Amino acid sequence: MTEQTPSPNPAEAPIDPLSTHPASPFMHTEAPAPVAFASPPTPLQVVPSSSTWVLYRTQIEFGLAMLAYLMVLVGSVVVVQANPEASWRYVVVLFPVAPAAFVIWLFVRALARLDEKQKRIQMQAFGFSLGFTALITFGYGFVEGAGMPHLSWTYVLPLMAVLWALGAAIYTWRYR
Amino acid sequence: MAVQVKNRLRVLRAELSWSQAQLAAKLGVSRQTVNAIETGKYDPSLPLAFSMARTFKRRIEEIFEAEGTRV
């Protein structure tokens, strides 16, 4: 063990803290503990209408409304088939119109929430759908007159929907 | 004669280190719309252009430029 020799240079000599001297008026105190201040509140997060969350919520609502429509449709068909002579069957077959109207309301609301480019894509897709549906239905009407089997009008809306989805995919791809 | 419109959106956005999604949220449009405007595939409406100018605190002429003209 080596004894520390005092430094010849007074400037390098260790300095006694003022509070250690018996006659010192200073008192040794500990530094105050840091105080944990609460963080300032974060600004309210505004969810824009075009956000993914709104999109998912709309899709879930749309899916649930379609499920309700299908359940009411199947139920009304079953009831009417079990009671083919009942006078109230005309009312029961119209029951699916109510959830269908809700689906349409959701659809219109979703369209209103789109931004301007998305609205333009939808407009072009509807034009695409309308034009090709007219071509296909008129074309089939002509060949039906020549002897092809008659098809129900209920096929027109699904055809429009498929062509609208195809048009939306095409025009969305063109803006990429 | 159709006027070709160029814009400096990508440069201005990069200066502020904003992502396309962040800018889209500020403008209230989709990220795909911001991308289509940046790539010149879609020209925004006048209200959206004004909204961009306000967001970047610049004049519209500093963001958009018609083909063949100088700011």
Image (tube, coloured by chain):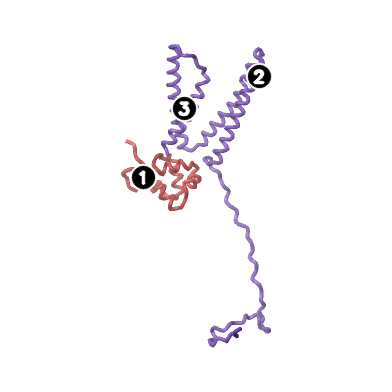
Give the chain of mark 1.
B
Q: In front: mark 2 or mark 1?
A: 2
What x and y, as percent, mark residue B31? 47, 43
Q: Quadrant of residue A80?
A: top right
Q: Residue at x 45, y 23 (%)?
A: A133
| Label 2 Cα crowd, 10 Å radius (few <14 / some 14-19 / many 20+) | some
Compared across the picture, whether A131 is left or right of B68 comes to right
**Marked residue nearer the N-terminal end (3 or 2):** 2
Q: Are the residues tagged 3 and 1 within 8 Å (C-beta)?
A: no
What amino acid is found at the position of numbered circle 1 in the picture? Glu
Give the chain of mark 3.
A
Give the color of chain A as drawn: purple
**Which residue occupies the extreme bottom position in the image?**
A8
- For label 1, the SS is strand
> Which mark is on residue A24?
none
**Which residue occupies the extreme right position in the image?**
A22
Give the chain of mark 2.
A
Give the color of chain B as drawn: red
Q: Quadrant of residue A107?
A: top right
- Give above or below for B63 relative to A94: below
| Label 1 Cα crowd, 10 Å radius (few <14 / some 14-19 / many 20+) | some
What x and y, as percent, mark residue A30? 66, 72
Q: Residue at x 47, y 29 (%)?
A: A164
Q: Kindly identify which residue carries mark 1.
A: B65
What amino acid is found at the position of numbered circle 3 in the picture? Leu
Q: Kindly identify which residue carries mark 3.
A: A163
Compared across the picture, whether B40 is left or right of A13 comes to left
Q: Are the residues tagged 3 and 2 within 8 Å (C-beta)?
A: no
> Which mark is on residue A79?
2
What amino acid is found at the position of numbered circle 2 in the picture? Val
